[in-house]
Image (spheres, grey):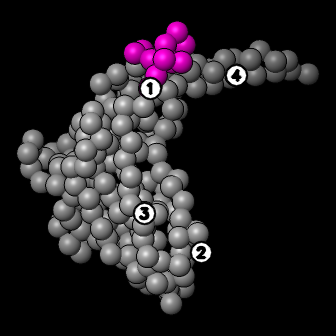
Amino acid sequence: MKNTKPCRSIRILVLGFLFAGLIFEARAQSKPDSGWPTYGNDPGGTRYSPASQINRANVAQLKVAWTFRTGALDQPTRMIRKAAFEATPILADGKLFLSTPYDHVIALDPQSGAKIWEFDPGVDLQHNYSEVASRGVSAWRDSKAKIGQPCRLRIFLGTLDARLIALDGETGKHCADFGSNGEIDLSRDAATQME
């Protein structure tokens, strides 16, 4: 009978090195000045930040720098009881981006909390959605676009009414070259249509 333990050990060792390399690569992509560009900070969702400004020695001394009210709780709708903020703001190009339960997208100055722009997708709040929560936005940078070109940084939002919207990270305006004037109807040709 052939002894397979050495082969198994070598395979486990190789897989271990590959896995360690993937973790190292994900951490290497998260530079201290890169912000928090995606949910979990990187495509692997590691939630790792190499920033060292806040640590165990000073975390207890942190104070609130600013607060921001989205106005979501002021919406005149019967769905208010279903509304929930379940998004993680992202930081890209020196701006914080977040979405509200009713799918408004807001860009904020991270230093002051001042609103830079707000986008309202016009979701019909009379429709009885099963829940009213936005899981956040995503950002994508067009590496071929020149600095200052519209939609170089795109902010994506999936809406309650089944649309995918691409916005210019600088202005909050639709990216006209995405879908139909910045939107794709995700319910089109679906087996179940919204009522």
Q: Quadrant of residue 179?
A: bottom left
In percent of width and height, residue 170 lies at 17, 50
Which sits earlier in the primary sequence, circle 4 or circle 2?
A: 4
In the picture, measured across the screen, residue 82 lies left or right of residue 31, that is: right
Q: Amino acid at mark 2?
A: Ser
The stretch drawn in magenta includes residue 53: yes
Q: Is residue 122 visible?
A: yes
Q: Which residue is mark 3?
A: 72
Residue in front for this viewpoint, 110 or 134: 110
Mark 3–mark 1 Cα distance, whole angstroms, equals 25 Å
Quick check: 112 above or below 139? above
The residue at which mark 1 appears reads as 63
Q: Residue at x 40, y 19 (%)?
A: 51
Judged by depth in the image, the label closer to the viewer, 3 or 4, is 3
Which one is closest to the eye, mark 3 or mark 1? 1
Kindly state the secondary structure of the residue where label 1 is placed. Answer: loop
Question: What's the residue at 9%, 50% (across, down)?
Answer: 149
Q: Which type of secondary structure does the marked residue at label 2 adopt?
A: loop
Give the residue number, with chain letter if any, for mark 2: 130
Q: Earlier in the sequence, mark 1 or mark 2?
A: 1
Mark 4 vs mark 2: in front: 2
Residue located farthest toward the top when viewing the structure as drawn: 57
> Do the residues under discs 2 and 3 have CB atoms within 8 angstroms?
no
Percent coordinates x, y for residue 3 in the rendering: 85, 18
Q: CA distance from mark 2 to mark 3?
A: 17 Å
State the CA–CA distance, disc 4 to disc 2. 46 Å
Q: Is residue 33 above or below residue 158?
A: above
Boundaries of the magenta span: 52-63
Residue 166 point in image, percent of width and height: 28, 61
